[in-house]
Image (tube, rainbow, N blue to C red):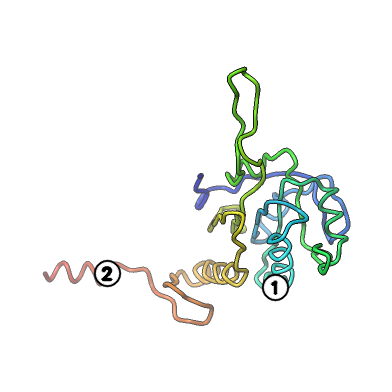
Amino acid sequence: MAVLVGKKAPLFTAQAVVDGEKIVSEFSLSDFIGKKYVVLFFYPKDFTFVCPTELHAFQEKIEEFEKRNVQVIAVSTDTEQSHWGWLQLPKELGGIKGVKYPVVADTNKTISTNYDVLAGYWDFNEDGEMVAEGELVAYRGLFLIDKNGIVRHQTVNDMPIGRNVDEVLRIIDAWQTFEELGEVCPANWHKGQETMKASHDGVAEYLTKH
C-alpha cells in the first residue's frame, strides 16, 4: 500500500451529491486547498450495513469538524445516482438521509486507485482476456489533508471494521496543536492535555557527560 503521509494529496474532480440532494458534476478537492483541512474517507458500498453507521457517525459530529475548519468528504465507487437514492432513504430503513457533507462518486475508480485503497485488481486470464480479481470497491481508507494539500494522517480498515469518529477528531486536534504550538503530542493525548517540546538537548547533554 502507498504511504501518502507527507506527500501531496492526489487531486480529483468528480460527480458528487452535496447537501443531501444536489448532484454536482464537477466537485473538486482543489476547491478546499488553502482554505480548509479535509477529512477524506472511503467506504465500500451504498445500501450496506456498516457503511451507513459510519456516514451517520460523521454527520452527528459535523459541528465538531466545522469548529476545527475541517471539510468532511465521503467517497465510494458507486454512481452519483446511487448516492442520491441512498441519501433519500431514512435511517431506519438503512439509508443515510440527513447526511449533508459531500458524497463523491468514484465510478471509474481512479480516486480509490490514486489513494491506493481499491480492493481487487485487474488481471488477464490465459486467453488474454481482462478479468477482475476480487471486488473493485474501496476499503475503509481515511486521510487527513492539511490546508496546503499535504496528507498528514492515513488509516485503512478492512471492510468489516467501522471507524471511530472521535479518534479522527483526536488526530485533527493533535495535528492542529502541533501547527499552533510547534510541540508534539504523546501517546493517548487529548486536547487540553500537556504537549511535549521535541528537543534532543537533554539527550546530548547526557551523552556528553557520560
Q: Is residue 87 left or right of residue 121?
A: right
Crowdedness of circle 2 by 10 Å Cα count: few (<14), some, many (20+)? few
Mark-to-mark CA distance, 2 and 1: 41 Å
Give SS at disc 1: loop
| x 51%, y 77%: residue | 190
Which residue position is annotated with label 1? Answer: 61
Q: Is residue 124 left or right of residue 95?
A: left
Indicate whether 24 appears above or below 93. Answer: above
| x 62%, y 69%: residue | 165
Q: Which mark is first along the chain, 1 or 2?
A: 1
Q: Nearer the viewer, residue 159 or 69?
A: 159
Question: Where's residue 185, x and y in %?
Answer: 45, 72
Residue 62's quadrant in the figure?
A: bottom right
Question: Where's residue 144, x and y in %?
Answer: 59, 59
Question: Where's residue 129, x and y in %?
Answer: 65, 21
Number of numbered discs visible in the structure rendering:
2
| x 76%, y 53%: residue | 46
The amino acid marked with disc number 2 is Asp
Give SS at disc 2: helix
**Quadrant occupied by the C terminus:** bottom left
The amino acid marked with disc number 1 is Lys
Q: Which of labels 2 and 1 is toward the front?
A: 1
Which residue position is annotated with label 2? Answer: 201
Residue found at the very far front of the displayed protein: 126
Residue 209's quadrant in the figure?
A: bottom left
Indicate whether 169 appears above or below 153. Answer: below
